[in-house]
């Protein structure tokens, strides 16, 4: 059984991630509803993910220089305020995509602080041999939330309206802040010596760690970035377009599909929690990439709601195979003094590349069918996994 701090972190995540999942599916639907433009929706999606490109690396420096709990609480507090401002703007009749995009950009900017600090904090909460189980357990918080969030969104949209789905998201940040404040963690390690390098010097030191001292980790980050170019745009923007154009269904159907994906993610997390100890995390990660890509490619031949839900469930199983294993690898291989910075690079390669991927999917969907977009992008994602499986150093990264 996990200790009190891990359980508190899990509980805060269940609540806040439920709100986030509602926000993430409501935002593109809101913009599609207001504008009817896939290209504008694509640009809004880019604005929501671009901050990871701009701020992830500085966020990693902050996670290594300042108490990680306080960084997480600050991130939640500012995001609660900003989502509240978005609600006020929409209630007053605001419909300008530029302002919606600007607020989405600001929310994501402060989110970039949270996840490097959280992932770097976990090794101070549990022993090394419990890291995979702890990461899987924390991951289930997101899966539970993303299972409940879309279902809640589908039910609540008829009761409170699309705008107040964002109000619910704002409230959940407060619950997360309380849970994080109650966590007890061991003291954060600091570099030896009395003098503190500048923030820029810290940033350069982190980059040198993955480009010179541990090049295989740098290769893993590069492969993660390339894989997410193929996978994240279809996930964020492709699915709502697929629901509208191929299935010709409504927001409730979109929410149900997202819930099936969350159910697959929860299943994958449970399997890793139960059986992942002793498995090679590199193997699990790379097989997950192959599963993710192949399941998206198969959407090319799918045009029924039930088949889409089944396939998306299988797709969801592959997601924690990637995310949990990658987190465990970083926690086991990277020294504590660099851990926040390396997790910020992971955040950059995941969330940051989502901006690029979303920016590609919208214009592509204007000129070719969305099913074809899924086919091409899915093949590219699967090939990333195949490449990794053939690379000996990547396969033995944790064994070094």
Image (tube, rainbow, N blue to C red):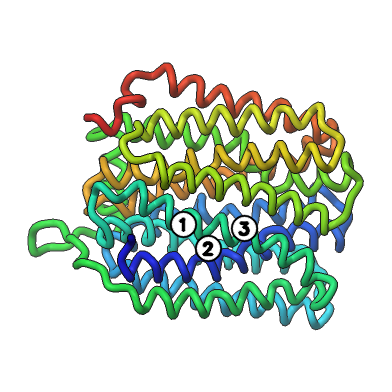
User: Alpha carbon of mark 1 to alpha carbon of mark 3: how far?
Assistant: 25 Å
**Is the C-beta separation of discs 1 and 2 under 8 Å?**
yes
Q: How crowded is mark 1: few (under 14 residues within 10 Å), some or many (20 or more)?
A: many
Q: Where is residue 9 in the image (x, y as percent from the top left)?
A: 41, 67
Secondary structure at numbered mark 2:
helix
Which residue does the numbered mark 1 point to in the structure image?
55
Whichever of callouts 1 and 2 sits on the residue coming sooner in the sequence is: 1
Which residue does the numbered mark 3 point to in the structure image?
146
Q: Is residue 349 something that shows in the picture? A: no
**Is the C-beta separation of discs 2 and 3 under 8 Å?**
no
Up-down: is 168 above or below 153? below
The quadrant in which residue 368 appears is: top right
Relative horizontal placement of residue 252, taking residue 393 as reference (left or right):
right
Residue at point 40%, 40% (across, down): 275
Whichever of callouts 1 and 3 sits on the residue coming sooner in the sequence is: 1
Residue at point 78%, 35% (across, down): 364
Q: Residues within 10 Å of mark 2 (few under 14, many from 20)?
A: many
Q: Nearer the viewer, mark 2 or mark 3?
A: 3
Name the residue at the right extreme.
Answer: 248
């Amino acid at each position: 059984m996990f200790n009190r701090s891990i359980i508190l972190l899990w509980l805060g995540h269940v609540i806040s991630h439920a709100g986030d999942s509602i926000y993430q599916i409501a935002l593109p639907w809101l913009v599609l509803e207001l504008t009817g433009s896939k290209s504008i929706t694509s640009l809004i999606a880019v604005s929501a993910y671009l901050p990871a490109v701009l701020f992830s690396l500085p966020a990693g420096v902050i996670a290594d220089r300042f108490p990680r709990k306080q960084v997480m609480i600050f991130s939640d507090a500012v995001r609660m305020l900003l989502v509240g401002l978005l609600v006020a703007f929409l209630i007053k009749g605001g419909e300008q995509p530029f302002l919606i995009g600007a607020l989405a950009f600001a929310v994501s900017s402060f989110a970039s602080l949270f996840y490097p600090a959280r992932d770097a904090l976990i090794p101070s909460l549990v022993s090394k041999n419990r890291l995979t189980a702890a990461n899987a357990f924390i991951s289930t918080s997101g899966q539970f939330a993303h299972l409940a969030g879309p279902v809640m969104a589908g039910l609540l949209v008829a009761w409170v309206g699309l705008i107040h789905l964002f109000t619910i998201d704002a409230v959940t940040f407060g619950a997360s802040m309380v849970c994080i404040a109650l966590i007890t963690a061991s003291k954060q390690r600091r570099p030896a010596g009395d003098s503190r390098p500048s923030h820029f010097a810290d940033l350069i030191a982190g980059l040198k760690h993955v480009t010179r001292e541990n090049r295989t980790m740098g290769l893993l980050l590069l492969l993660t970035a390339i894989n997410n170019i193929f996978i994240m745009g279809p996930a964020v923007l492709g699915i709502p377009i697929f629901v509208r154009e191929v299935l010709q269904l409504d927001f409730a159907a979109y929410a149900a599909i997202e819930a099936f994906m969350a159910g697959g993610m929860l299943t994958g997390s449970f399997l890793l929690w139960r059986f992942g100890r002793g498995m090679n995390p590199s193997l699990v990660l790379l097989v997950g990439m192959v599963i993710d890509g192949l399941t998206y490619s198969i959407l090319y031949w799918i045009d029924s709601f039930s088949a889409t839900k089944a396939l998306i469930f299988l797709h969801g199983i592959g997601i924690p195979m990637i995310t949990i294993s990658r987190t465990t690898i970083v926690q086991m291989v990277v020294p504590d003094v660099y851990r926040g910075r390396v997790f910020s690079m992971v955040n950059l390669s995941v969330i940051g590349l989502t901006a690029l991927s979303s920016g590609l999917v919208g214009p592509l969907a204007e000129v070719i069918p969305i099913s074809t977009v899924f086919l091409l992008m899915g093949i590219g994602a699967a090939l990333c996994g195949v490449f990794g499986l053939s690379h000996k150093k990547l396969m033995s990264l944790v064994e070094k």
